[in-house]
Image: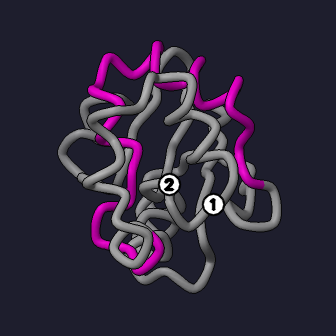
Amino acid sequence: MNALLIWYPKCSTCQKAKAWLDEHGVACKTRHIVEETPTAAELAEWHARSGLPLKRFFNTSGLVYKNEHIKDRLPGMSEEEQYALLAQNGMLIKRPLLLLGDWVLVGFRPAEWEAAL
Protein backbone atom coordinates (compact mmCIF):
# COMPACT_ATOMS: atom_id res chain seq x y z
CA MET A 1 0.00 0.00 0.00
CA ASN A 2 1.62 3.26 -1.12
CA ALA A 3 1.15 6.34 0.97
CA LEU A 4 2.25 9.95 0.89
CA LEU A 5 3.51 11.42 4.15
CA ILE A 6 3.59 15.19 4.20
CA TRP A 7 5.88 16.10 7.03
CA TYR A 8 8.47 18.39 8.55
CA PRO A 9 11.52 16.16 9.09
CA LYS A 10 12.72 18.06 12.18
CA CYS A 11 9.35 17.60 13.92
CA SER A 12 9.49 14.85 16.57
CA THR A 13 5.85 13.89 15.97
CA CYS A 14 6.55 13.55 12.25
CA GLN A 15 9.58 11.40 13.03
CA LYS A 16 7.42 9.15 15.22
CA ALA A 17 4.84 8.89 12.45
CA LYS A 18 7.49 7.91 9.89
CA ALA A 19 8.92 5.30 12.28
CA TRP A 20 5.41 3.94 12.88
CA LEU A 21 4.84 3.58 9.13
CA ASP A 22 8.19 1.82 8.73
CA GLU A 23 7.42 -0.56 11.62
CA HIS A 24 4.05 -1.42 10.07
CA GLY A 25 5.53 -2.05 6.62
CA VAL A 26 3.73 0.85 4.97
CA ALA A 27 5.71 2.04 1.97
CA CYS A 28 5.47 5.77 1.64
CA LYS A 29 6.87 8.69 -0.24
CA THR A 30 7.63 11.79 1.77
CA ARG A 31 7.06 15.44 0.96
CA HIS A 32 8.58 18.28 2.96
CA ILE A 33 5.69 20.49 4.11
CA VAL A 34 7.75 23.72 3.89
CA GLU A 35 9.82 23.05 0.78
CA GLU A 36 6.77 21.74 -1.12
CA THR A 37 3.90 23.46 0.65
CA PRO A 38 0.53 22.04 -0.40
CA THR A 39 -1.48 24.23 -2.74
CA ALA A 40 -4.88 25.65 -1.89
CA ALA A 41 -6.43 23.20 -4.38
CA GLU A 42 -4.68 20.22 -2.77
CA LEU A 43 -5.78 21.35 0.68
CA ALA A 44 -9.39 21.75 -0.49
CA GLU A 45 -9.36 18.22 -1.95
CA TRP A 46 -7.78 16.70 1.15
CA HIS A 47 -10.18 18.56 3.43
CA ALA A 48 -13.15 17.19 1.48
CA ARG A 49 -11.74 13.64 1.60
CA SER A 50 -10.90 13.82 5.31
CA GLY A 51 -14.39 14.58 6.57
CA LEU A 52 -12.80 16.77 9.24
CA PRO A 53 -13.52 20.39 10.12
CA LEU A 54 -11.13 22.72 8.28
CA LYS A 55 -9.78 24.01 11.59
CA ARG A 56 -8.13 20.59 12.12
CA PHE A 57 -5.78 21.43 9.23
CA PHE A 58 -4.29 24.36 11.15
CA ASN A 59 -1.24 23.88 13.36
CA THR A 60 -2.81 25.68 16.31
CA SER A 61 0.20 25.12 18.55
CA GLY A 62 2.67 26.59 16.05
CA LEU A 63 4.43 29.93 16.40
CA VAL A 64 3.15 31.27 13.09
CA TYR A 65 -0.44 30.55 14.11
CA LYS A 66 0.05 32.28 17.44
CA ASN A 67 2.20 35.21 16.29
CA GLU A 68 -0.14 36.09 13.42
CA HIS A 69 -3.27 35.79 15.61
CA ILE A 70 -4.82 33.32 13.16
CA LYS A 71 -7.38 32.20 15.75
CA ASP A 72 -8.91 35.66 15.74
CA ARG A 73 -8.88 35.93 11.95
CA LEU A 74 -10.47 32.55 11.07
CA PRO A 75 -14.11 33.27 11.98
CA GLY A 76 -14.39 35.98 9.30
CA MET A 77 -12.67 33.98 6.56
CA SER A 78 -14.26 31.85 3.86
CA GLU A 79 -12.97 28.32 3.27
CA GLU A 80 -11.23 29.53 0.10
CA GLU A 81 -9.43 32.23 2.08
CA GLN A 82 -8.42 29.67 4.70
CA TYR A 83 -7.01 27.33 2.03
CA ALA A 84 -5.06 30.25 0.55
CA LEU A 85 -3.71 31.16 3.99
CA LEU A 86 -2.59 27.58 4.67
CA ALA A 87 -0.94 27.39 1.25
CA GLN A 88 1.16 30.48 2.02
CA ASN A 89 3.13 28.84 4.81
CA GLY A 90 3.62 25.13 5.40
CA MET A 91 4.25 25.77 9.09
CA LEU A 92 0.57 26.75 9.45
CA ILE A 93 -0.52 23.26 8.41
CA LYS A 94 -1.06 20.54 11.02
CA ARG A 95 1.45 17.81 10.50
CA PRO A 96 1.97 15.15 9.56
CA LEU A 97 -0.60 14.55 6.86
CA LEU A 98 -0.96 10.99 5.61
CA LEU A 99 -2.64 10.34 2.29
CA LEU A 100 -3.41 6.67 1.97
CA GLY A 101 -5.93 5.47 -0.59
CA ASP A 102 -9.16 7.30 0.19
CA TRP A 103 -7.90 8.29 3.63
CA VAL A 104 -6.51 11.67 4.63
CA LEU A 105 -5.23 11.59 8.18
CA VAL A 106 -4.28 14.82 9.93
CA GLY A 107 -1.84 14.67 12.81
CA PHE A 108 -0.38 11.49 14.24
CA ARG A 109 -2.76 9.35 16.25
CA PRO A 110 -1.54 5.74 16.17
CA ALA A 111 -5.00 4.22 16.83
CA GLU A 112 -6.51 6.24 13.98
CA TRP A 113 -3.69 5.26 11.65
CA GLU A 114 -4.05 1.59 12.67
CA ALA A 115 -7.76 1.70 11.79
CA ALA A 116 -6.98 3.22 8.38
CA LEU A 117 -4.63 0.38 7.51
Q: Secondary structure at mark 1?
A: helix
Compared to residue 61, the image places residue 106 above or below, namely above
Above/below status of 111 relative to 115: below
Left or right of 68? Residue 40 is right
Q: CA distance from mark 2 to mark 1?
A: 5 Å
Specify the segment rendered in magenta: 37-64
Per the image, the residue denoted by label 1 is 90
Residue 55 — which label? none
Q: Residue at x 44, y 23 (%)?
A: 78
Number of marks in picture: 2
Q: Find residue 9 and report its horizontal and vertical position in percent.
A: 62, 77
What amino acid type is highlighted by mark number 1? Gly
Classified by dominant secondary structure, the portion drawn in magenta counts as: helix
For label 2, the residue is: 93
Report the residue at 51% width, 42% height from top: 98
Marks 2/1 in contact by CB < 8 Å: the verdict is: yes
Dot 2, crowdedness within 10 Å: few (<14), some or many (≥20)? Answer: many
**Kind of residue sitting beneath label 2:** Ile
| Picture quarter with the N terminus | top right
Task: Tell me: 107 left or right of 34.
Answer: left
Q: Is the C terminus in the top left, top right, bottom left or bottom right quadrant?
A: top left
**Which residue is the extreme one toward the right?**
35
